Image (tube, rainbow, N blue to C red):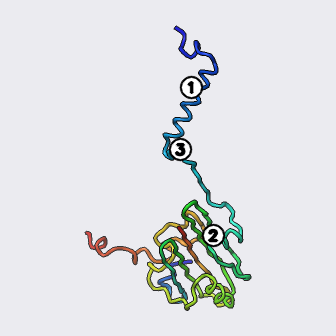
């Protein structure tokens, strides 16, 4: 027995297939709305960093490593670089830190301490780089015998 | 870098700005007087 599609005119088959694809698109996860995706910039430029982090890189910046994900709704920039000490005050003021920075004693104050940013930016320190593992151990964990 | 928080010779300073839809944290390692090292995370929703 021949399949039913072989007995139909080709334009009817094309119409049915097109309708099926159209219905699947409408009933998909996006409910027919356009899907807008962005991807992290593989090699962000200084302009990318300044645009998405909303800051101005100092002239003395060197050894710059950055991960820039412009995102669609959320954007994230992970950045590390070296700079001349005399450029630091102006950079901090431009970046929104008018007050002097405070000494960091608590790992909770480390940016990206909990998030494994090193997967995104290999130049970023690992958690072990910031703090010895024994210091992050919970008392309840070490009490178990 | 090596366990910066427990190394008394390291000079690590930081600050953060945390507002609805906006987060920016910075840490600056000033151990080297000739060249400071900046770590910055910026997130915006």
The image position of residue A141, as x and y in percent, is 31, 70
Chain ID, mark 2: A
N-term-proximal mark, 3 vs 1: 1
- The numbered disc on residue A52 is 2
Q: Secondary structure at mark 1?
A: helix
Q: Quadrant of residue A10?
A: top right
Q: Quadrant location of the N terminus of chain B?
A: bottom right
N-term-proximal mark, 3 vs 2: 3
The image position of residue A51, as x and y in percent, is 66, 71
Q: Name the residue: 57% across, 71% down.
A: A124
For the residues beneath circles 3 and 2, the answer to whether they share a chain is yes
Q: Is residue A119 above or below residue B33?
A: above
Q: Is residue A91 above or below residue A41?
A: below
Mark 3 neighbour density, 10 Å: few (under 14) some (14–19) many (20 or more): few
Q: Name the residue: 62% across, 60% down.
A: A40
Q: Quadrant of residue A49?
A: bottom right
Mark 1 neighbour density, 10 Å: few (under 14) some (14–19) many (20 or more): few
Of A100 and A141, nearer the camera is: A100
For the residues beneath circles 2 and 1, the answer to whether they share a chain is yes
Q: Name the residue: 52% across, 36% down.
A: A24
Nearest-to-viewer mark from 2 and 1: 1
Q: Name the residue: 69% across, 75% down.
A: A63
- The numbered disc on residue A16 is 1
The image position of residue A100, as x and y in percent, is 55, 91
For the residues beneath circles 3 and 1, the answer to whether they share a chain is yes
Chain ID, mark 3: A
Between the residue at mark 3 and the residue at mark 1, the CA separation in whole angstroms equals 19 Å
Asked if the residue at tag 1 contacts the one at tag 3, i.e. Cβ–Cβ closer than 8 Å, the answer is no
Q: Secondary structure at mark 2?
A: helix
Chain ID, mark 1: A
Q: Which residue is mark 3?
A: A32
Q: Secondary structure at mark 3?
A: loop
């Amino acid at each position: 027995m021949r399949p039913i599609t072989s007995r139909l005119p080709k334009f009817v088959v094309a119409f049915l297939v097109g309708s099926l694809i159209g219905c699947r698109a409408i009933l998909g996860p996006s409910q027919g709305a356009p899907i807008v995706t962005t991807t992290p910039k593989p090699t962000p430029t200084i302009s990318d960093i300044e645009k998405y982090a909303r800051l101005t890189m100092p002239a003395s910046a060197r050894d710059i490593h950055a991960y820039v994900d412009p995102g669609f709704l959320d954007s994230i920039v992970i950045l590390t670089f070296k700079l001349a000490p005399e450029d630091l005050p102006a950079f901090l003021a431009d970046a929104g830190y008018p007050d002097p920075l405070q000494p960091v004693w608590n790992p909770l104050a480390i940016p990206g301490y909990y998030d494994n940013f090193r997967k995104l930016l290999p130049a970023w320190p690992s958690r072990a780089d910031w703090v010895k593992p024994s210091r992050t151990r919970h008392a309840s964990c070490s009490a178990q015998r | 870098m090596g366990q910066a928080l427990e190394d008394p010779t390291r000079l690590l300073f930081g600050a953060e700005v945390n507002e609805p839809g906006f987060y920016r944290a910075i840490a600056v390692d000033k151990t080297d007087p000739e060249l400071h090292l900046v770590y910055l995370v910026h997130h915006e929703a």
